[in-house]
Image (cartoon, rainbow, N blue to C red):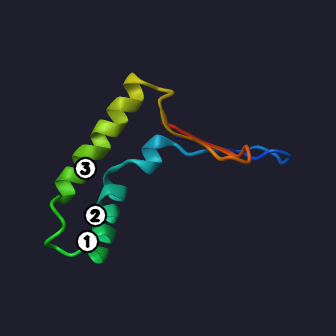
Amino acid sequence: MKITIQSPGEKTIKIAIPTRMLFNGLTAKLGFASIRKYVSTEELNLSSADLKRLVKEIRKTKNKYPHLELVNVESSDGSKIIIKL
């Protein structure tokens, strides 16, 4: 995953995060625990297995579309934020 932050008149910030480090079974379990902590059980309609399946699909998508843009936001003052898978 690559995150790029561009502001006019300032240096561009580029952050690269390994996808395997970000999307794996451990982070899915930690994410599920965090979600369960802040969301009531009546509103929560997914399990840890669902999050693991989501992580698996994200990794498959990265292999199929290596430079897929997830977010591309530009503000009125010219600042940009781009997140690529």
Disc 2 residue type? Answer: Phe
**Marks 2 and 1: CB-CB under 8 Å?**
yes
**Disc 1 or 3, which lies upstream in sequence?**
1
Camera-side residue of 25 and 85:
85
Residue linked to disc 2: 32
Question: Please, what secondary structure does the residue beneath circle 3 have?
Answer: helix
**Closest to the observer: 2 or 20?**
2
Picture coordinates of residue 28, whole percent (x, y): 31, 56
Give neighbour class at mark 2: few <14, some 14-19, many 20+ (Cα, 10 Å).
Answer: some
Q: Which residue is mark 1?
A: 36
Spatial separation of the CA atoms under disc 1 and disc 3: 15 Å
Dot 1 amino acid type? Arg
Residue for badge 3? 52
- Looking at the picture, tell me which residue is in the foreground, 3 or 23: 3
- Whether residue 18 sits left or right of residue 46 in the image: it is right
Q: Quadrant of residue 8?
A: top right
How many discs mark residues in the rendered view?
A: 3
Q: Is residue 25 left or right of residue 49?
A: right
Give the residue drawn at x 52%, y 43%. 18
User: Is the C-beta separation of discs 3 and 2 under 8 Å?
Assistant: no
Mark number displayed over residue 25: none
